[in-house]
Structure formats: structure tokens, C-alpha cells
Image (tube, rainbow, N blue to C red):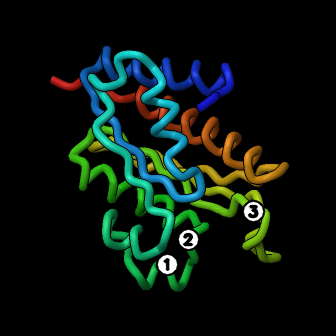
């Protein structure tokens, strides 16, 4: 898989920060389909900090693997802040990691609505004992472009958590 220079630089920064602090990482992905995990594991030495990735494309997988409540999915929809936060927090707990990141949204070309258009992606990153960060972006372009931009945005959120996390004792 080809990743942009910016994606790989973000991934390298995350892996280095996690290694320096003795932290472990996990991912929970829907619309990115494992691309965040793939980018992180493109970095040599990632195996020292990257524990696992959850690809939970279907709502039932979000519930079964990450503990996202069915009623939350029914009420808010998968492409929502609430679900992105629940995915990251569920991955953190289920993987036993120190930091988790999630991405969920509408990559297109179909599936958009007036309130949730194609290109809308919600991301969240959480670290053990810390706050869950969230960001939502409306990305432009085709499916590949939306997914690529979502990878970079999610990695940037993960890097922020890794850089501000205290070192593990």
C-alpha cells in the first residue's frame, strides 16, 4: 500500500513518541477500513508499540467488538461524534492499550444525506486516564481521497495524544 509522505511522517512520529514513553497503541476503524493500522505498521519497529487494530465496518461489529451501544448507533448513526468516541474508548479497553484512535464516516460515493454528506468523518483519540479528543471533518474528493485525508487527520489526533501522554512507569 502506498501512503503519502505526510501520512508516513505522522506515523513515524507516533511510533517514536510511543516507544520513547513505553506506550501501546490500538485502532478502531470503520470508513478507513484498516488504513490507519496499515500506515502505522508501515513504520519499522511498530511491533514494539502497536497492539492490534479493529476494523468494524458494520454496526454489528462496532457493538460486538468495541461495545458501542446498539441504541447509540440507531439514534446517532455510525457517522457521529458519539460513536467515534465510543469506538476509541471501546478499543482502548478491549485491547488493553494506552492510546486508541477511531474513524467513522461516509467515504462515498453513496450513503450521504443532507445532514451527513459524503466526506463527513468523525475521529476520536483517547489515552488511558486522559480525555477523549474528537474532531470532525468534511473532506472533499472521491472515496480514495476522503479515506486518505481521514487517515492523516486521525493520525494527527493520535500524535497529539501520544505527544502529551505521560511516560509509562
Using the image, determine if residue 124 lies above or below residue 83.
Answer: above
Count of numbered badges drawn on the protein: 3
State the residue at coordinates (63%, 35%).
152
Q: Earlier in the sequence, mark 3 or mark 2?
A: 2
Q: From the image, which quarter does the C terminus lie in?
A: top left
State the residue at coordinates (41%, 29%).
162
Residue 157: image location, x then y, percent: 54, 38
Q: From the image, which quarter does the N terminus lie in?
A: top right
Residue under pointer 2:
78
Residue 32: image location, x then y, percent: 58, 50
Number of other residues with Cα within 10 Å of mark 2, as a class: few under 14, some 14 to 19, many 20 or more: many
Residues under numbered marks 2 and 1 in contact, where contact means CB atoms less than 8 Å apart = yes
Q: Which mark is residue 73?
A: 1
Gap in Å between the C-alphas at discs 3 and 2?
Answer: 14 Å
Residue 91: image location, x then y, percent: 33, 53
- Depth check, front residue: 126 or 78: 78
Residue 73: image location, x then y, percent: 49, 78
- Depth check, front residue: 58 or 19: 58
Nearer the viewer's eye, disc 3 or disc 1?
3
Number of other residues with Cα within 10 Å of mark 3, as a class: few under 14, some 14 to 19, many 20 or more: some
In the rendered view, does 80 fall on the left or right side of 4?
left
Q: Which mark is residue 108?
A: 3
Using the image, determine if residue 133 lies above or below residue 10.
Answer: below
State the residue at coordinates (63%, 28%).
3
SS under mark 2: loop
Amino acid at each position: 500500500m502506498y501512503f503519502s509522505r505526510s501520512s508516513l511522517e505522522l506515523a513515524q512520529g507516533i511510533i517514536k513518541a510511543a516507544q520513547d514513553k513505553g506506550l501501546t497503541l490500538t485502532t478502531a476503524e470503520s470508513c478507513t477500513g484498516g488504513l490507519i493500522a496499515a500506515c502505522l505498521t508501515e513504520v519499522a519497529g511498530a511491533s514494539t508499540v502497536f497492539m492490534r487494530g479493529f476494523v468494524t465496518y458494520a454496526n454489528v461489529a462496532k457493538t460486538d467488538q468495541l461495545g458501542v451501544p446498539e441504541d447509540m448507533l440507531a439514534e446517532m448513526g455510525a457517522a457521529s461524534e458519539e460513536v467515534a468516541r465510543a469506538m476509541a474508548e471501546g478499543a482502548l479497553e478491549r485491547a488493553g492499550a494506552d492510546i486508541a484512535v477511531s474513524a467513522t464516516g461516509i467515504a462515498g460515493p453513496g450513503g450521504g444525506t443532507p445532514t451527513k454528506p459524503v466526506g463527513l468523518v468523525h475521529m476520536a483519540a483517547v489515552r488511558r486516564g486522559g480525555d477523549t479528543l474528537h474532531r470532525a471533518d468534511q473532506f472533499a474528493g472521491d472515496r480514495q481521497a476522503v479515506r486518505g485525508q481521514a487517515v492523516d487527520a486521525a493520525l494527527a489526533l493520535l500524535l497529539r495524544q501520544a505527544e502529551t501522554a505521560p511516560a509509562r512507569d
